[in-house]
C-alpha cells in the first residue's frame, strides 16, 4: 500500500472501463473473475503488474485488467515478456495465452522461456480449438477432431502441454479448470507464489466452437471419477467417496480400490511436488476418457523446483562485470587501445 | 645496398591465401601500423562463405585489401598495386584486380603441383614459371622453407612453425614500405602472453621477413607513403560493426537508458553482438534469443519497460521481424532495428555485400507501416548513424531502421573519435503525471506528434497497448472507419514530421547545380566520392550528394534534384533508391547498378558519368 490512507484494493479496482467482448458463456469470463479477485489478495499494487498476451480470444485479457498491459502479436507474448522481465525484474509479469498461441505459433518461444526460467506467470487457456479464427482444430485437439478445417477429422497427434513443458525443464507445472473457481483461485495464487516461470494450464470451455471438450472433468456426474486433485503429501485418491487410489506397480500407475482388504493406505502414491520423475508420470495421465482402464485426469500443482531465474543472472552478470572492470567510461571506450596523433 | 626508396602517394595492397593462412591478421596488422604513421586508410576484408573451405581451393580464398595513402582515401581501391599470395588459388582468384605492371609477391611453396591442381590450373602449368606473369613484377619467395629454417631448433612442431608463415610475409612487406615493426611485436607479445615460445617464434619470423628484404638484392624498390593531410586530432582504427556497437553504447550512456540488445546470430551482423557483450560494465544487456522474432519482440518488451530496445540482423532475419516491427509501429515505442545488409534473396551471399534491403526497410511489412530509415556511409559513420537512430527512436517514439552493409561492417578506416561530452544530448523524459483531466491518455500527442512514454510501475498511469487499431488519444480498441483512416494518416504524418528535425540535404562536392548529380546512399559513398573528386579535378561539371536520412527524405531534396540536368544513382541493387526518387519527385534519374556482392570501383562510376556528360 502506498500510504496508510490507501484502501485495500478489491476486484473492482482491477476492472477496466472496457466492455468485455467474449461470447456469452465463454469460460474466459470465469478465469477473468478469479484473476481479478485473487490479485487484491496478493497485495501488489496495480501499477506493478503487467499482463502480456498474444492473439486469440483469451489474449484480449489485458484490456480488461486495470494494470499495465500489452496485447502483442500471435505467439510472441512469451518473448515480449522475456525482454520486459529482463530489464524490469521489479514487475509482476503475467502472460495470457491460448493453446494455439502458446503451442502452435508460439511453441518455440514457450520452451525457451521455460528453460531460461524467467520469473513470470503463464496462464495457458486451453480450449482445444482456435476460437478467434472461428473454430479450426488446435495442437491440443484430439486426433479425429471434426472442426472447420477438418471435416473428415484431424490427423495431428496432439501435444500433451504439461509433458512438453516439463520436457523444457519448467520449474512449475500445474493444471486447473474454468469451472472450478475455488481450485482455480488457489492455483492462481500458487502460480504467483512460485519464483521462476510458472505454467498454469487452465481447461477452458469454448462454448461456441468446442462446447463440452472437458465436460467429463467438469460435470458433476463424471467429475469425481474422471479427475484427481493432487495435493502435497496427500495420497492420490478419487472417486465418488474417495474410494479409488493410485498405486505404483513398478513404474506403472494402477487404480486400486482402497476398501479392498489387500490394499493398504501406505501403498498409495503420495504426491510430492518436488519429485520430478513422478511429476513426469503424472502429466502422462492423459488418456482419452473413453478408453478402457484409463487413468483419471490430474489437476493441481504437479511439479515445483527452485532454480535461478534468468533475470537475476542476467542483471547479476552486468553487476559482476561492473565490479570487476569498474563502471564503463565512455571516453575510454571510444578511445580504444591503439590511437595515434595527427598534429 | 642498391635499393632505392621511392615516395608513393597511395598504395593498394591485397593479401590473399587460404582462410587458414592468417590473411586477415596479416592485413589488419599492416593496417594498424600504417595508421600509426598517419596514413589515411580504407580496408576491405573478403571472406569465403565456408568457415573451413577445402584448403587450396578457389572457394577457400580469403582476401584482405588495404588502401593507404598520404592523400585522403575513400575506398579500399579499384585495382591493386601489390598482390601478396600465399598459394596458387589466391593468385588465380585475384589476378584480375592487379593493375598492369603491378607487383606480385608469391609464396612458391603454395604453387606445388597439388596447389596448382586445386586452383584449377591446367596440368603442368605453373604461372610463376611459364612467363604468363611477364607483364607484372614478380617476386617469388619460398616462405615455407625460409620460415622452417628460421625456426630450426626452436622445438616447435611442423604445424606450429607453419602457422608463423604469415609473419614472414608481413615482415617482408614492412620492409618494402619502410615500416617500423614494433607495433606488431607488441601485438604478438600481448596475444601470446601465455605462450612465450610461440610469441618468440612469431617475432623471430617477422624479423626474418624484414631482414630478408635487406639481404636479398633481387628486389630493388622500396617505398614510403607519408602521413596524409588529415584533420588534427587523435585517431583510432575502427570497423563498421565496432562503430555500430560503440554508437549504441554511447546512446545508452547519453540517454541514461539501459541498452537491451536482442538478436539472433547472422553474418554479417553478429560482430556487433560480440562487441557489445564484452562491454557489460556499461550496463549493456545482450540477449541471444531463440530466433529473430523473439529477438525483436523481446526488444519491444524491454522498450515497454523503459530500456533502449535494439534488435539486429541481416536481410533474412529482418524478413522474420516484419510483423513485430508493425507492432512497434502501432505501440509507438522506441525500437532500433539494425540491418547489416548482405546479398540475397533468401540465404543469398552471406559474406558478400549488397544494398539489398532499402525497400524492405521502407515497405517490407503489411499495410501502411511507416518506419524512419537512416543509413551509414562508411565504417566510422556507423557510429554517428546508429547514434542518430537511437536519438530519433526515443524522441519520436518510433521504431527506426539503421542500415549498414557487409562492406562497411567489416571494412575499417581511421576514426577521429569524439569526446563523450561533445555527443548530442539524448533527452528522455518518462511521463509520470496524468495528461488529461483525471485520466491518462496514452496516445495523446506532443508537437512532434509522438505519444508519452509511461513505464509500468508508474502509479496511476496504468494503460494497455497493443496491435489492434487504437482510438485517437485514448488508445482504446477502435474499429471506427473514420478513426482508422485518421490514425493511418497520423502515423504517416508523425514519421514525415521527423523531417523538421533532421538537417537539410547537403551537396558533398561540386556546385549546387549543373550537368550531372551523382546521388547515393549508404556504403557507395567512398567510391562515389573518389569518382566525383577525380572528375571535378579533370574539369567535369559533376556534383555529389549522399543521402543519410532515407525516410523521411530531407525536405530540400526535390529542389536539389531539379537543379541538375541529369541525376545518376549508383546502387548495389537493381535500383531501389532510384525507384523512390523517380516516383516521389518525378525526376528522370538514371541507375547504375551492380549486384556482384562487391563494392563499386570508382572507375565504374566515373565511366558512367563521362558517358552521361557526353550524351
Ligand atoms: C501471424 C498470425 N497468424 C494468424 C493469425 C490468426 N489467428 C489469430 S488467433 C489464432 C488462433 C487462436 O487460438 P488460441 O491461441 O487457441 O486462442 P483462442 O482464440 O482459442 O483463445 C489465429 C490462428 C494471427 N492473428 N496472426
Ligand atoms: S469463440 Fe470460444 S473462446 Fe472465443 S470468446 Fe467465444 S466462446 Fe470464448
Image: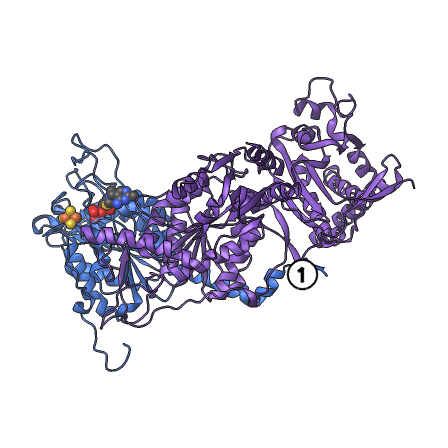
Q: Is residue B348 above or below residue B239?
A: above
Q: Is mark 1 within 8 Å of ligand 1?
A: no
- Note the chain letter of the purple one: B
Q: Which residue ends up furthest to the top in the rendered image? A: B123
Report x, y in % for residue A31.
18, 57
Using the rendered image of the protein, determine whether residue B479 is visible from the camera's viewpoint: no
- Taking depth in this image into account, of A69 and B178 the one nearest to the observer is B178
Chain of the residue on which disc 1 is drawn: B
Q: Which residue ends up furthest to the left in the rendered image? A: A221
Question: Left of B164 or right of it: where is B437?
Answer: left
Q: Colour of chain A?
A: blue
Q: Is residue B105 above or below residue A263?
A: above
Split into 4 quadrants, where in the image is the N terminus of chain B? Answer: top right
Q: Which residue ends up furthest to the bottom in the rendered image? A: A4
Question: Left of B281 or right of it: where is B321?
Answer: left
* Crowd around label 1: few <14 · some 14–19 · many ≥20 (10 Å): some
Figure quadrant of residue B585: top left
From the image, tell me which residue sits under label 1.
B234
Split into 4 quadrants, where in the image is the C terminus of chain B? Answer: top right
Question: Left of A296 or right of it: where is B505?
Answer: right
Amino acid at each position: 500500500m502506498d500510504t496508510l490512507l490507501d484502501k485495500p484494493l478489491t476486484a473492482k479496482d482491477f476492472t477496466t472501463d472496457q466492455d468485455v467482448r467474449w461470447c456469452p458463456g465463454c469460460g474466459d469470463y470465469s478465469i477473468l473473475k478469479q484473476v481479478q479477485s485473487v490479485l487484491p489478495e496478493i497485495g501488489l499494487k496495480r501499477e506493478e503488474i503487467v499482463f502480456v498476451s498474444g492473439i486469440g480470444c483469451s489474449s484480449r485479457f489485458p484490456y480488461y485488467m486495470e494494470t499495465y498491459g500489452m496485447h502483442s502479436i500471435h505467439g510472441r507474448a512469451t518473448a515480449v515478456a522475456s525482454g520486459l522481465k529482463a530489464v524490469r525484474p521489479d514487475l509482476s509479469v503475467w502472460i495470457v495465452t491460448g493453446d494455439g498461441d502458446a503451442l502452435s505459433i508460439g511453441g518455440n518461444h514457450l520452451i525457451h522461456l521455460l528453460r531460461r526460467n524467467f520469473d513470470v506467470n503463464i496462464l495457458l487457456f486451453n480450449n482445444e480449438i482456435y476460437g478467434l479464427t472461428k473454430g479450426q482444430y488446435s495442437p491440443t485437439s484430439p486426433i479425429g477432431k471434426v472442426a472447420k478445417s477438418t471435416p473428415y477429422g484431424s490427423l495431428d497427434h496432439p501435444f500433451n502441454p504439461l509433458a512438453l513443458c516439463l520436457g523444457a525443464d519448467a520449474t512449475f507445472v500445474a493444471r486447473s479448470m474454468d469451472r472450478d473457481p475455488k481450485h482455480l483461485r488457489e492455483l492462481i495464487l500458487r502460480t504467483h507464489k512460485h519464483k521462476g516461470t510458472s505454467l498454469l494450464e487452465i481447461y477452458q470451455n469454448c462454448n461456441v466452437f468446442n462446447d463440452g471438450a472437458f465436460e467429463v472433468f467438469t460435470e458433476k456426474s463424471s467429475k469425481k471419477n474422471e479427475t484427481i486433485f493432487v495435493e502435497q503429501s496427500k495420497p492420490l485418491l478419487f472417486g465418488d467417496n474417495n474410494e479409488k487410489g493410485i498405486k505404483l506397480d513398478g513404474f506403472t500407475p494402477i487404480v486400486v480400490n482402497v476398501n479392498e482388504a489387500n490394499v493398504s493406505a501406505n501403498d498409495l502414491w503420495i504426491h510430492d511436488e518436488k519429485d520430478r520423475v513422478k511429476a513426469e508420470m503424472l502429466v502422462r495421465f492423459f488418456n482419452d476418457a473413453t478408453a478402457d482402464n484409463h487413468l483419471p485426469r490430474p489437476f493441481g500443482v504437479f511439479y515445483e523446483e527452485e532454480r535461478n531465474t534468468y533475470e537475476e543472472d542476467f542483471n547479476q552478470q552486468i553487476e559482476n562485470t561492473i565490479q570487476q572492470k569498474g563502471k564503463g567510461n565512455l571516453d575510454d571506450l571510444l578511445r580504444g587501445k591503439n590511437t595515434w596523433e595527427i598534429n | 645496398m642498391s635499393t632505392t626508396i621511392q615516395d608513393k602517394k597511395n598504395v593498394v595492397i591485397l593479401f590473399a591465401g587460404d582462410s587458414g593462412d592468417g590473411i586477415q591478421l596479416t592485413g589488419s596488422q599492416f593496417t594498424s601500423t600504417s595508421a600509426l604513421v598517419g596514413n589515411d586508410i580504407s580496408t576491405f576484408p573478403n571472406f569465403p562463405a565456408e568457415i573451413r573451405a577445402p584448403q587450396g581451393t578457389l572457394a577457400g580464398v580469403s582476401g584482405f585489401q588495404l588502401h593507404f595513402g598520404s592523400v585522403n582515401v575513400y575506398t579500399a581501391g579499384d585495382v591493386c598495386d601489390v598482390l601478396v599470395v600465399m598459394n596458387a588459388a589466391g593468385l588465380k582468384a585475384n589476378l584480375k584486380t592487379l593493375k598492369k605492371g603491378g607487383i606480385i609477391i608469391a609464396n612458391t611453396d603454395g604453387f606445388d603441383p597439388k596447389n596448382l591442381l586445386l586452383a584449377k590450373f591446367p596440368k603442368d602449368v605453373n604461372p610463376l614459371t611459364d612467363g604468363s606473369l611477364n607483364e607484372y613484377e614478380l617476386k617469388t619467395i619460398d616462405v615455407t622453407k625460409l620460415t622452417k629454417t628460421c625456426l630450426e631448433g626452436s622445438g616447435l612442431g611442423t604445424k606450429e612453425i607453419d602457422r608463423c608463415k604469415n609473419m614472414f610475409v608481413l615482415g617482408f612487406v614492412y620492409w618494402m614500405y619502410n615500416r617500423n615493426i614494433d607495433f606488431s611485436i607488441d601485438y604478438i607479445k600481448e596475444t601470446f602472453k601465455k605462450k612465450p615460445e610461440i610469441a618468440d617464434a612469431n617475432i623471430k619470423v617477422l624479423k626474418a621477413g624484414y631482414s630478408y628484404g635487406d639481404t636479398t638484392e633481387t628486389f630493388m624498390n622500396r617505398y614510403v607513403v607519408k602521413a596524409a593531410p588529415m584533420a588534427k586530432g587523435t585517431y583510432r582504427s575502427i570497423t563498421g560493426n565496432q562503430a555500430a556497437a560503440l554508437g549504441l553504447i554511447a546512446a545508452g550512456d547519453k540517454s541514461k537508458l539501459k541498452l537491451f540488445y536482442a538478436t539472433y546470430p547472422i553474418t554479417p551482423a553478429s560482430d556487433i553482438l560480440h562487441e557489445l557483450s564484452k562491454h557489460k560494465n556499461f550496463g549493456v544487456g545482450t540477449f541471444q534469443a531463440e530466433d529473430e522474432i523473439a529477438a525483436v519482440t523481446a526488444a519491444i518488451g524491454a522498450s515497454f519497460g523503459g530500456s533502449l530496445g535494439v534488435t539486429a540482423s541481416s536481410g533474412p532475419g529482418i524478413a522474420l521481424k516484419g510483423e513485430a516491427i508493425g507492432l512497434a509501429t502501432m505501440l509507438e515505442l522506441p525500437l532500433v532495428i539494425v540491418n547489416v545488409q548482405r546479398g540475397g534473396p533468401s540465404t543469398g551471399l552471406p559474406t558478400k555485400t549488397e544494398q539489398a534491403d532499402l525497400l524492405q526497410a521502407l515497405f517490407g511489412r503489411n499495410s501502411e507501416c511507416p518506419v524512419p530509415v537512416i543509413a551509414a556511409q562508411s565504417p566510422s559513420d556507423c557510429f554517428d548513424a546508429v547514434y542518430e537512430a537511437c536519438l530519433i527512436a526515443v524522441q519520436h517514439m518510433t521504431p527506426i531502421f539503421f542500415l549498414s552493409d557487409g562492406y562497411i561492417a567489416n571494412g575499417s578506416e581511421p576514426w577521429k573519435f569524439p569526446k563523450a561530452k561533445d555527443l548530442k544530448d539524448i533527452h528522455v523524459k518518462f511521463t509520470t503525471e496524468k495528461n488529461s483531466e483525471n485520466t491518462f491518455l496514452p496516445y495523446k500527442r506532443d508537437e512532434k506528434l509522438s505519444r508519452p512514454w509511461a513505464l509500468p510501475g508508474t502509479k496511476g498511469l496504468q494503460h494497455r497497448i497493443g496491435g489492434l487499431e487504437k482510438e485517437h488519444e485514448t488508445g482504446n480498441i477502435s474499429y471506427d472507419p473514420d478513426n482508422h483512416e485518421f490514425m493511418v494518416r497520423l502515423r504517416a504524418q508523425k514519421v514525415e514530421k521527423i523531417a523538421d528535425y533532421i538537417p537539410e540535404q547537403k551537396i558533398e562536392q561540386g556546385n549546387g547545380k549543373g550537368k550531372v548529380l551523382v546521388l547515393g546512399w549508404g556504403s557507395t559513398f567512398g567510391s562515389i566520392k573518389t569518382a566525383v573528386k577525380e572528375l571535378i579535378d579533370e574539369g567535369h561539371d559533376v556534383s555529389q550528394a549522399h543521402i543519410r536520412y532515407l525516410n523521411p527524405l530531407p525536405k530540400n531534396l526535390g529542389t536539389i534534384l531539379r537543379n541538375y540536368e541529369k541525376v545518376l544513382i549508383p546502387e548495389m541493387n537493381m535500383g531501389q533508391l532510384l525507384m523512390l526518387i523517380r516516383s516521389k519527385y518525378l525526376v528522370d534519374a538514371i541507375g547504375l547498378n551492380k549486384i556482384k556482392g562487391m563494392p563499386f570501383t570508382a572507375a565504374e562510376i566515373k565511366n558512367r558519368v563521362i558517358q552521361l556528360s557526353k550524351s
